[in-house]
Image (tube, helix red, strand yellow):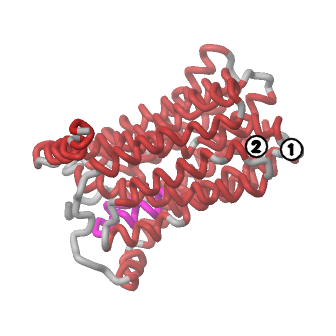
Amino acid sequence: MLRLAGVPGILSAMEASMQTPKNKGVVGIGILSVSHLLNDLYSNYLPQMLPFLMLAMPGFTVTKAAVLTSVFSITSSLIQPVFGYFVDNMGRRWLVHVGTLWMAIMLSLTGIVHEYWLLVILASLAGMGTAAFHPQASSMVNVLSGKFKAVFFSIFVAFGNIGFALGPLLLVPLFQAFGLKASLVTVIPGIVVTVLLYFFAPEVNISGKASESLGSAVQTLRKSSRELSAIVGVIAVRAMAYTGMLTLLPLYFQERNYSKIVASRLVTLMLASGALGGVLGGVISDRYGRKPLVVASLMLASPLFYLFLNTQRFVSLVFLAFAGMSLMSNFSVTIVAAQEVIPDNKALASGLTMGLAGGLGGLAVIFIGRIGDVWGLSTAISILFALPIAAGFVALFMPGKKRAATGA
């Protein structure tokens, strides 16, 4: 009993040591990055279930698959600007751990329901958890990053991309070995990370001012609407390509008679390469500017994806890896670019870019899914592979120079 009684004291001591000025930034970013890994693993949860749901649920079409993943994407995205506004004005540290636990619980229940409409409800509720986590966590990282915002934020994003990559690698074998009911055990990592965040998530001053009215926030957005519109447009088109690939590639590989394990490894290769590309993109953009990196990487991604589709074996894998790297190398850069446009509203900028833009892209995936049902998955995949170059053209309207960092 004495040992158990000492646990809170030990945790308090650990927390105090981690919050010293010297260690606060690195430790805080590290904890938030690991938590981001789990959050994005959960965000890539539903696409891994789709091949199994097609076998388990009669009448489960490509359109229904697209609706299911899009509902999660939409609710997780469109609510983010609202959370972002409140984070900018008040800061809510508890959003990171409550949001994580909420999403873990909702997704862990998806494997035990047998009605499609219940799946849709659970997916929409789960999305609210990641909507709560991302604006608060990304703003914390921005404040802790100092002068190297794109580099540290790209590390934070890279951990999220690694989580995405681990999704198919871990979940597909789990579902294949134990069935969809194994989803219940996937709540355990969420509980562990929730405890970690509860005790060790950093305390940072998110907003540089005490409060800002909704009217002031709207006025800030209006003044920067031209620059923000270009950035949001880039992210929306890229999100449609990214969410569409996560949804349809597993089904496309299944249609081509790839085993579920092989298909999961191909998706993992794309996502893991994207994680590496995100870090490289942050480094390059800090040195040469945001816009050149975004335009070049998106313009390059589409031909690389087509080369993957039209080559074989090892060469095909190389093109897929470089395509994923190119597509995701601008992910963190576009978010930082938005934060630099409205530096006093970092969480709102994160909510608009990671949230609203991603939601618009996710909504459009439903139409791509319908194309897959009517004209075939090959046609839908070809359209998805063309979208990055379209996003590259939109990126030409982004601000030409990155602004000097202001505030924290």
Between 392 and 408, the one nearer to me in the picture: 408
Q: Is residue 23 above or below residue 71?
A: above
Contact (CB < 8 A) between labels 2 and 1? yes
Mark seen at residue 380:
2
Question: Which image quadrant for residue 261?
Answer: top right
Pointer 1 local density, CA inside 10 Å: few below 14, some 14–19, many at least 20: few
| Residue 26 shows in the view | no
Structural crowding at the residue carrying mark 2, measured as other residues with C-alpha within 10 Å and reported as few (<14), some (14–19) or many (≥20): many
Q: Nearer the viewer, residue 132 or 282?
A: 132
Q: Earlier in the sequence, mark 2 or mark 1?
A: 1
Could you tell me which quadrant the N terminus lies in? Answer: top left
Q: Is residue 353 magenta?
A: yes
Q: How many marks?
A: 2
Main SS of the magenta part reads helix
Q: Which residue is mark 1?
A: 375
The amino acid type of the residue labelled 1 equals: Trp
Cα–Cα span, label 2 and label 1? 8 Å
Q: Position of residue 320 (x, y in %)?
A: 58, 27
